[in-house]
Image (cartoon, coloured by chain):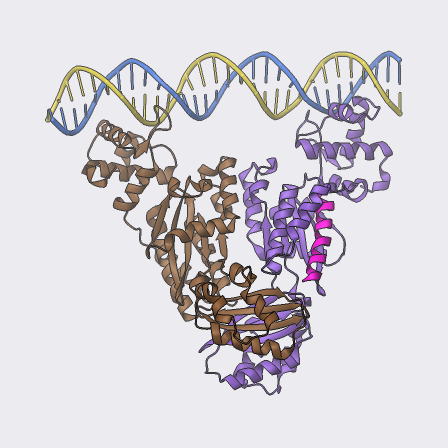
Chain colours: A brown, B purple, C blue, D yellow
Amino acid sequence: MAFEALTEREKKILGCLISHYVRSADPVGSRAIANKFRLGISPATIRNTMQDLEEMGLVQQPHTSAGRIPTDAGYRIFVDYLLRQEPLTDAEKAAIKDGLRVGAGGVDTILEQTSRVLADLSDHLGISITPQLDDSVLCRIELIQMSEGKLLVVLAFRSGLARTILLEVDAAISRLELEQMGQVLNEKLSGLTLGHIRKTIQERLVDSGGSPKLLRLFIDDDSDIWNNLGSSRMHIGGTEKIIFQPEFADRENLKDLMKMLHQESGLIQLLQDKSNKNSGIIITIGAENRAKEIQSCSVVSASYSAGNTTGTIGIIGPTRMPYGKLMSLVKYAARQLSKVMKGK
Amino acid sequence: MAFEALTEREKKILGCLISHYVRSADPVGSRAIANKFRLGISPATIRNTMQDLEEMGLVQQPHTSAGRIPTDAGYRIFVDYLLRQEPLTDAEKAAIKDGLRVGAGGVDTILEQTSRVLADLSDHLGISITPQLDDSVLCRIELIQMSEGKLLVVLAFRSGLARTILLEVDAAISRLELEQMGQVLNEKLSGLTLGHIRKTIQERLVDSGGSPKLLRLFIDDDSDIWNNLGSSRMHIGGTEKIIFQPEFADRENLKDLMKMLHQESGLIQLLQDKSNKNSGIIITIGAENRAKEIQSCSVVSASYSAGNTTGTIGIIGPTRMPYGKLMSLVKYAARQLSKVMKGK
DNA sequence: TATTGGCACTCTTCTCCTACGAGTGATAAA
DNA sequence: TTTATCACTCGTAGGAGAAGAGTGCCAATA
């Protein structure tokens, strides 16, 4: 399994096999490799090597007398050691830049564009996730009375994100109370991250001088504001393309994927889990994914920065994906996105 | 084609044929009808009648020596004249009520739940669309300076909806200017519908006394606020179920559907187009749909009220759908949704 | 000793063929 | 007007066989 244990030839053949398989989606035979990549060795030799690779668990045969296909472990070696990033064409770069051009509507619109562009250029699923609010610095909080009993809370973050939430109030509220409460909240909370606020809200607001009935809305343990507001949003593009990948000819596979896609929280976790720990491109292959629904898929993701927080974008597709290309794509898109967000 | 031209027997057989076909998804033969529905007539008689129905264009044969399947026109007759709504079970009613129970996060969360519930109970696609802002009454507008050059505009509507939009400002803005501008905007605009505001914004704000550089953001012809804010949002549920409907075994069909689903604006138009004109349940069958991508699908939709505006919910599936059940479902859900929204 | 050509073997896939069955339309009898 | 019957059509399921791809192994080779 260790990369060092592989001979030069084994590496080369694993590489050829994978890059051929990614294109063809059919098991790759020794002859195919010998013909396509002029390695100067005969099919028979390649066969021997392929047997070795199979013993190491890097490739497998769907059935006797078929060619080989890579295993998850094989892809892993490929991605970690053999992969060379494929540079993007000028057209592709342009498409990304155009797609992310600052439009109206703020962060959400841009992210929707991003997932669209990623999907279009990759023919796989493009995913984008809003920055994590937990690390976002609150820059202002505003209270708006919409009617008796309905109070709109607006939270504006330094990263350019804004969230609104509607609260129910039992008692009537005077204009004065509202203004006062707003002042208190801004004094005590602005400049802090949402995560920080969530943890320390109790101590910060007790005895702060706000009106008790309003105060309760913000302090209560199960206050909707702090508990539900942190969740990120997600955009998906390319569903209409991914269904043509041969691995999704089986409806059960497709079902798993679809289920995953519409189960927002799970997917967000899936992508954020990883991106947090590392700052570069993260590639998760097949069974490495926690969620069993997509263990026949791989995820290529990267984080982008927005203000002092980060969000995540990525591409999801079958493990048989052009990793080199997709890495460049995601990397470039993440960088562009960070730039655009800074401009915001 | 006219309903009156049909004999009693023809109506009956059309009805039997459709309700059988909806279940089986297979062409229905004369024997099947004779066996399943004890009509007291022989298969031969039924065959004769089916020939008549075919001449009228209400049913068709996929090929010689297959049973019949309904045409769009057949479904139309069925829906308009023969359909009896299937009452919901208590469990179903409970599921809807539970699903729509007021949760945190306001309108969007509820609508997401709604689409989920509709999908779960129908095994088709559940769609929900936010109320049209154009008819929504603005109850307050708030300006928040997020940093130099970034201005957050918050619009709160009486229906409980809120929208934020981020604007770029060239020049520095003083606190005073901002407050003044906020006052002017609220004075001049609150109490009006967004649509009204859009049309009359020029006259209303010219010479209103606000700071010119701020004023420009709101008056300019291509101001992002009024142009881009009106668009509704949409939620979809049930994608993982619909792919098992036999009509989507063909990947091309599935692709068309998926394309449609992710093309938000088109879909919103599709559903809203109709719901506006009529206040009850709207059913659009197959080729009656404008968008050619879903001309093998039917749409059952209804509008709900929120404040003084309306939004739309609906179900999309193959034309072979249990119209009676889905009508009841959508109707009940829309009514519940209106109730919940009123409570908001 | 590593590589290669050759060969027998395996397994899938494609095609052709047939038999079957479902369903019809027409006709003649009830 | 309805029904029983029968010949006919056409899609589908199943099986046989051929083709093809690819392997593993072995003996020859450089």
Q: Where is residue A61? Give x, y as percent.
A: 34, 28
Q: Is residue B201 above or below residue B255?
A: below
Is residue B335 covered in magenta? yes
Residue drawn at x 44%, y 51% as measured from the top left: A269
* Majority secondary structure of magenta residues: helix
Q: Is residue B238 visible?
A: yes
Is residue A85 covered in magenta? no
Number of residue marks:
0
Q: Is residue A341 above or below residue A327?
A: below
Residue drawn at x 62%, y 43% as measured from the top left: B120
Q: Which residue, as the protein is rendered here, is positioned at the far front?
A: A207
Residue B27 as seen in the image, left or right of residue A41: right
In the foreground, A300 or A267:
A267
Q: Check the picture and name the quadrant holding the C terminus of chain A.
A: bottom left
Q: Residue A50 sits in which quadrant?
A: top left
Q: Check the picture and name the quadrant holding the N terminus of chain A.
A: top left
Q: Where is residue C19? Give x, y as percent.
A: 59, 12
Q: Residue B53 sits in which quadrant?
A: top right
Q: Is residue B140 above or below residue B94?
A: below
Q: Is residue A144 above or below residue B82?
A: below
Residue D30 as seen in the image, left or right of residue A17: left
Q: Is residue A161 visible?
A: no
In the foreground, B298 or B61:
B298
In the foreground, C19 or B89:
B89
Q: Where is residue B174? Give x, y as percent.
A: 49, 85
Q: Where is residue A146? Give x, y as percent.
A: 65, 71
Residue A38 as seen in the image, left or right of residue A299: left
Q: Which residues are magenta?
A: B326-344
